[in-house]
Image (cartoon, coloured by chain):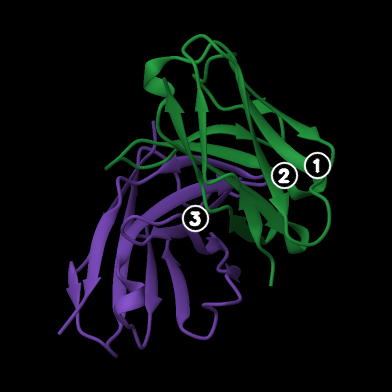
Chain colours: A green, B purple
Amino acid sequence: QTVVTQEPSFSVSPGGTVTLTCGLNSGSVSTSNYPSWYQQTPGQAPRTLIYSTNTRSSGVPDRFSGSILGNKAALTITGAQADDECDYYCALCMGGGTHWVFGGGTKLTVL
Amino acid sequence: QVQLQESGPGLVKPSATLSLTCAVSGGSISSSTYFWGWIRQPPGKGLEYIGFIYYSGNTYYNPSLKSRVTMSVDTSTHQFSLSLTSVTASDTAVYYCARAVAGGLIDQWGQGTLVTVSS
C-alpha cells in the first residue's frame, strides 16, 4: 500500500523560512508523481498552491515554492506570515497519473 | 470562473448508499481538458482521494474504495455524481467535488458537504 508521508507538525518564526516535505513509504518521489501542495484553513476547502512539482497555481504568491529535495517533494515558504498558520497537504499521482494519494498533512504554526 | 457545488443528503444510514451530485457552472463539463472528481475528509483528519471521471465516462477510482464506488457524468445537466455503497461510520466525512487537469493540478474545489453515517 502506498503511503505518502508528511511531518505532522512544524513551526516557523514570523518572517522565517520553512520547508515541508512529502515522501513515499517505499521509493523516491520524482517529477513523474506530479507532486502538488494544498493549503487548508479550518472549515474551508483546500486551496491549491503548487502542482507539477514547482508550478504555482493562479494567484499564489511567489514566497511559496515547490521542488524535489533528495527523494522527497518539498514546499518552501519564505517570509512566513501569521496567516500561513494552517494545514498543508501534499498529493502524489501514482499509476501513470490515474491514482492520487494524499499525505496526512502538516500543521504549520507561525510563532 | 467555473464553480462547483455539491448537493445530497447530510445523513445516511449504515449499510445504505451515499449519493452526491456536483453541479458545474461557468464552464463546460464536456471539455476534454478536465477530469471531475471527489475527495473526502473525515472530521479532524486528512484528505482522501476517492476518484475521478472524464467527460467520456472513463473512471479512475481509489483502489481501496473501488468495490463500493461508482461515478457518473451527465453532460446534459452539467453535473457529475458519486455513489458509495454499504457505508459505515468511517465514511462520515466532508465530501468535496473537484476539477483536475493532467499534471496533478486540482484547479477548482467545491465548498464541501458533510455527510454523516448514523442510524
The residue carrying mark 1 is A31
User: Which residue sits at x=45%, y=40%?
Assistant: B108
Element class at badge 1 = helix
The residue carrying mark 2 is A34
| Residues indicated by labels 1 and 2 sit on the same polypeptide chain | yes
* Mark 1–mark 2 distance (CA, rounded to whole Å): 5 Å
Residue in the foreground of this view, choosing between A31 and A11: A11
**Residue B73 placement (x, y as % from top left):** 44, 65
User: Which residue sits at x=18%, y=69%?
Assistant: B9
Report the chain holding disc 2. Answer: A
Q: Is residue A34 left or right of residue B40?
A: right
Q: Can residue B75 be spotted in the picture?
A: no
The residue carrying mark 3 is B36
- Amino acid marked by disc 1: Thr
**Residue B3 placement (x, y as % from top left):** 34, 40
Dots 1 and 2: beta carbons under 8 Å?
A: yes
Report the chain holding disc 1. Answer: A
**Residue A101 placement (x, y as % from top left):** 61, 58
User: Which residue sits at x=49%, y=55%?
Assistant: B36
Q: Can residue A48 be spotted in the picture?
A: yes
Residue in the foreground of this view, choosing between A13 and B5: A13
Q: Is residue B36 left or right of residue A74?
A: left
Q: Residue A57 falls in which quadrant of the image?
A: top right
User: Which residue sits at x=46%, y=55%?
Assistant: B47
Residue in the foreground of this view, choosing between A14 and A23: A14
- Quarter of the picture containing the N terminus of chain A is bottom right
